[in-house]
Image: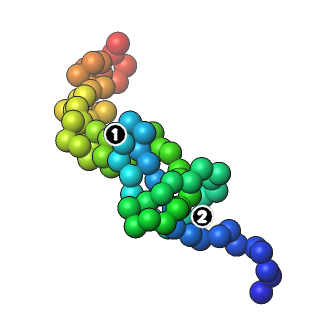
Amino acid sequence: MKQNMHPEYRDVVFQDISSDFTFLTRSTVRTDETIQWEDGNEYPLVKVEVSSASHPFFTGKQRVLSSGGRVDQFRKRYGRMAKGTK
């Protein structure tokens, strides 16, 4: 098996900058920033703009834009056109 082929898989802290939510998980992402975690250890830090704490789908703030499907919207807009008629 080739050496140094796979990226390093390690503990990483992800921080949602829009909601200040942080969580510790494992990842291969590379970063130069570090943060001291709740257990006293220092881990690499990755800042993200959206996580489950700030995404509208997970927070329940998602808006429904349309209730009909695309075909229904098309038929409503253009009506049913018969063959040969405009």
Q: Residue 45 has which mark? A: none
Mark 2: give few (<14), some (14-19) or many (20+) Cα within 10 Å.
few
Q: Residue at left 53%, top 61%?
A: 43
Closest to the camera, between mark 2 and mark 1, is 1
Q: Residue at left 34%, top 24%?
A: 83
**From this viewpoint, which residue is outermost toward the bottom?**
1
Residue 21 falls left or right of residue 75: right
Residue 18 falls left or right of residue 76: right
Hey, which quadrant is residue 7 in on the image? Answer: bottom right
Hey, which quadrant is residue 73 in on the image? Answer: top left
Q: Is residue 28 above or below residue 20?
A: below
Q: Which residue is mark 1?
A: 19
Exactly how many numbered labels are in the figure? 2
Of labels 2 and 1, earlier in sequence is 1
Name the spot of residue 76 as percent of width and height, x first: 23, 22
Q: Quadrant of the N terminus?
A: bottom right
Q: Is residue 76 above or below residue 46?
A: above
Name the spot of residue 39 as percent of width and height, x first: 40, 67
Name the spot of residue 47 as percent of width and height, x first: 50, 45
Residue 22 falls left or right of residue 72: right
What is the three-letter code of the residue carrying label 1?
Answer: Ser
What is the three-letter code of the residue carrying label 2?
Answer: Thr
Q: Residue at left 60%, top 64%?
A: 28
Q: Residue 28 has which mark? A: 2
Hey, which quadrant is residue 49 in on the image? Answer: top left
Q: Secondary structure at mark 2?
A: loop
Nearer to us in this view, 81 or 61: 61
